[in-house]
Amino acid sequence: MNIAIVGAGITGISTALEFARDGHQVTVYEQMNAAAEDASFAPGGWLLPCATQSLATPGAGMPFKQLKSGAGLTQASSMIGSPVWRWARQWKKHEKNASKHGNNALLTSLSTLSAYSASLRWQDCEDTDIAAERKSGTLIMLRTPQEVAFWNQQLPLLEAQNVACKMLPPPQAQALEPGLGQEITWLNAVYFPDGESINPRLWAQYLRLQAQEMGVAIRTGIQIQSISKQPVGVEITGTLQRHDAVVICTGTNHRLLQNLQLNLPIMPTWGYSVTAPVRDGLQAPRSAIMDWAQQATISRVGQRVRITAGLELGSSAEAPQHTHTLQRMYRLLNDWFPGGAQLSSPQVQVWRGSRGHLPDGLPLTGPSGHHGIWLNLAHGSHGVSLAAGCARAIADMVADRATAIDMQAFHPLRF
Ligand SMILES: Cc1cc2nc3c(=O)[nH]c(=O)nc-3n(C[C@H](O)[C@H](O)[C@H](O)COP(=O)(O)OP(=O)(O)OC[C@H]3O[C@@H](n4cnc5c(N)ncnc54)[C@H](O)[C@@H]3O)c2cc1C
């Protein structure tokens, strides 16, 4: 088949690679001048062993109320009736259901997809350190008895999903991350031995090279104006480019869906990363930690240290940077790993990016309802983690093969 992929972030590139592995002819269209320039540019690169990031999935990550009260959530126009209000109401309804039934179906779906992705991620990659600056073992740092109680409830649920995890007292956590500061107070850490963190952009570029070697054409600087249903294809400056199938991998950007009369509740949430050179390797993180109360991740990215935080619900690309969040991030990095990063270096990189969240925290991966048109977007806080699994599943669906895991929970027409 002759397949078009729209979008060259980690999702689009991973999807193109899977189609190439199946022997299809693939063209990727990307509006920017290179791959991984949008949400996949400098996110955390924390690879899920479970749902932990901000707005992970309702009932599994930090409760919405708590996010609002202290973990850095800022909301644009949450007035009654506004899109943000409607979206938050649906999210909270899912949270309520999860706590009522004690069996969080959303978490189960996400964990299954996450484990599937992990099983595929490193295929054909000989040196993951060079290809992706991969580090293993992640810690979630807990500061209060309430956080410890929350995680003591989560651990059996995760163990039931075969996620390896355990609560560690400070000396054991400190042995894993010797650079942790002595001044900051915390009670315990949850350890995920199979948790990983990577440099997402480097990984996307590595996959892009692999895809190109397999014959995938990557056409950058081309914006797709609309998707044609009959005949199937993409429209570029008024000209139709025909394909047998089109897969929309445009991340948060859902303009092309409106074109297809698909009105899905994708909410953009904006966040930040600050990446600084390592100052002293012994004081920098070895792998990755998450400050649960602050919903911030700190990870080692080669010879750099990266912190991510911030959750601006319903904001826009044009909004000014939230100075308070950035100041909080510099402070947190210094508190957790004092002397680990050169925060005054001119090489410090500050980045703001957006995640596309559905109210159930799960991506849109599957058929669009229009023959030959497929969706693989809106991966919320987990796009890097889920890319490999979603890509393989879409390739199987397009080939009319059974998928290795049940993908019903991610069906785009579930709303
Ligand atoms: C602060 C922050 C921290 C994060 N941390 C993590 C983390 O630790 N772990 C994790 O797994 N995920 C994390 N994420 C989420 C992750 O970054 C995203 O889910 C992932 O990068 C999405 O990849 P994508 O390819 O779907 O989207 P993108 O990377 O945004 O790619 C979509 C591409 O489509 C292109 N495009 C859009 N419209 C068109 C068009 N009409 N024509 C042509 N091209 C088009 C865009 O230019 C873009 O390049 C984080 C996100 C943020 C903001």
Image: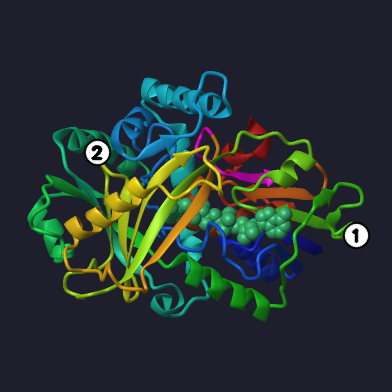
What percent of the width, then of the height, locates residue 52?
A: 36, 45
Above or below — where is 284 with respect to 291? Answer: below
* Left or right of 110 in this view: 395: right
Q: At 79% across and 53% down in the image, what residue appears?
A: 225
- Residue 35 falls within the magenta-colored stretch: no
Dividing the image into four quarters, tell me where ligand 1 lies.
bottom right
Q: At 10% across and 50% down in the image, what residue appears?
A: 169
- Residue 364 falls within the magenta-colored stretch: yes
Q: Nearer the viewer, residue 117 or 65?
A: 65
Q: Along the polypeptide, which appears first: circle 2 or circle 1?
A: 2
Tag of residue 239:
1
Above or below — where is 33 with respect to 38? Answer: below
Q: At 57% across and 64% down in the image, what residue appears?
A: 37
Q: Is residue 116 visible?
A: no
Tag of residue 272:
none
Q: Badge 2 is on which residue? A: 151
Query: Which range of residues does the magenta coloring cover?
Result: 359-367
Quadrant of the snapshot with the N terminus: bottom right
Q: Hey, what amino acid is under mark 2?
A: Trp
